[in-house]
Amino acid sequence: MNEPVKRKSNLSQLLVYVMVFVIILGMVVTVVTVVFRFANQGTVSNQVTGELNTLLDKVQVLVNESSSVECFNKDCTSESGNDLKLRFADSAKDPTCIFLENGSVRVAQGPGSDGNKGCTSESEPLTPTGVTVYSLTFTKVEDAQGGTTVKTDAALAYSARDTRIDIFLIIGLFVVGLFLIRSILSESKQKRLLAEVNKKLDSANADLKNLNEHLEQRVAEQTVEVRRAYEVEKTARIQLEELDRAKDQFVLSTQHNLRTPLTIIKGYLATMKDDSSISAESRATLERMAQAADTLSKFMNELLQITELNVMNKNKEAKDI
C-alpha cells in the first residue's frame, strides 16, 4: 500500500519540477527576446536607411540609363504611380518595368508576349529578402534644363530578427531543459533507491535486534542449564566422594578386624607346632594351616597398603585443588 503512495508522491514532485521549469523557460525566453530587440533597434534603423538608399540608387541608375520615361502607372494616365515603365535603346532591356508586388520591388526587362507594349512576366527583385516595402510611388519631375527625371518615394521595413538565433536559442533552452529534467529524474530515482536501501536497512536492523534478543534469551537459558548441570554434578561428586571415603574406611576397619583374629590364629598354630607330643600327621596339617595363614596375612597387608596409598593420593589431589 505504501508503494503506490510513494509513486504518486514522486509523480507529483516531478510535475511540480516540470511546471517550475516551464515557467523559468518562458521567463528566460521573454527576457532574451526583449534584450535582443533592444539591442537590435539601432541596427534595424541603420539597415532600413541603408536598404532605402540602395533601392533609390538602383531605381535612379535604371532611370539614368534609360532613353525615356514612358509611364508612371499601368494605364499611363497620370504623372505619378507605383508602376514605372522605362524605354531603352537596347532591345534586350526595352521596355523595363519597375513595380511593387507582394511587399517586394521587382524589375522586369525585355518585351512581353504582346510586343513592346508590355514588359516580360519574368522579373527580379530589387530589394533583398528581409525587406518589406509597404508603399512605392514614382513621380515625374522636370529639371531646369527641361529634362525629365523621376522622384521615388518608398516606405519599407527591415526584418532584423534572425530566425537562426531563435532556433539556436530554442535548441539551447531545450538542451538545458532536457538536462534539468534528467537531473530531476535522476534525483528522484536516487531518492527512491535511497528509500529502498533505508527500508532494507531498517528491516535488517529489526532482524538483527530480534536475533540479539533471542540470542540473549538462549544464552540466559543455556547459562541456567549449565548452572543446573553444574549443581547436579557437584552434588553427585560430593556424594561419590563421601561414598568413596566410607568405602576406604570400611576396607581399613575390615582389614584391621581381620588381622587381629588372623594374628591370634597364627600364634596358636606356632604354639601347637612346638608341642612334641603331636603326631607327624597333625604337624603336617599345622604346617599347611600356618602357610595358609601367612598367605592370607600377606594378601591382607597388600590390600591395606593399596588402600592407604589411594587415600593418600586422594588427600593430595584435594589439597592441590
Image (spheres, grey):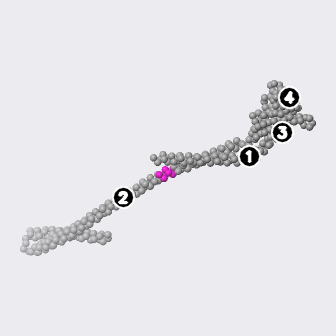
Mark 4 to mark 2 CA distance (whole Å)? 120 Å
Residue in the foreground of this view, choosing between 266 and 175: 175
The earlier-in-sequence mark between 4 and 2 is: 4
Determine the image quadrant of residue 272: bottom left
Front tag of 3 and 4 = 3
Residue at 77% across / 45% down in the picture?
Answer: 45
**Residue matched to label 4:** 91
Assign a secondary structure to mark 2.
Answer: helix
Residue 169 horizontal side relative to residue 75, left or right: left
Mark 1 to mark 3 CA distance (whole Å)? 25 Å
Q: Which residues are magenta?
A: 193-199
Residue at 82% across / 41% down in the picture?
Answer: 53
Front tag of 4 and 2 = 4
Front tag of 2 and 1 = 1
| Label placed on residue 217 | 2
| Label placed on residue 57 | 3
Mark 4 to mark 1 CA distance (whole Å)? 45 Å
Residue at 27% across / 65% down in the picture?
Answer: 235
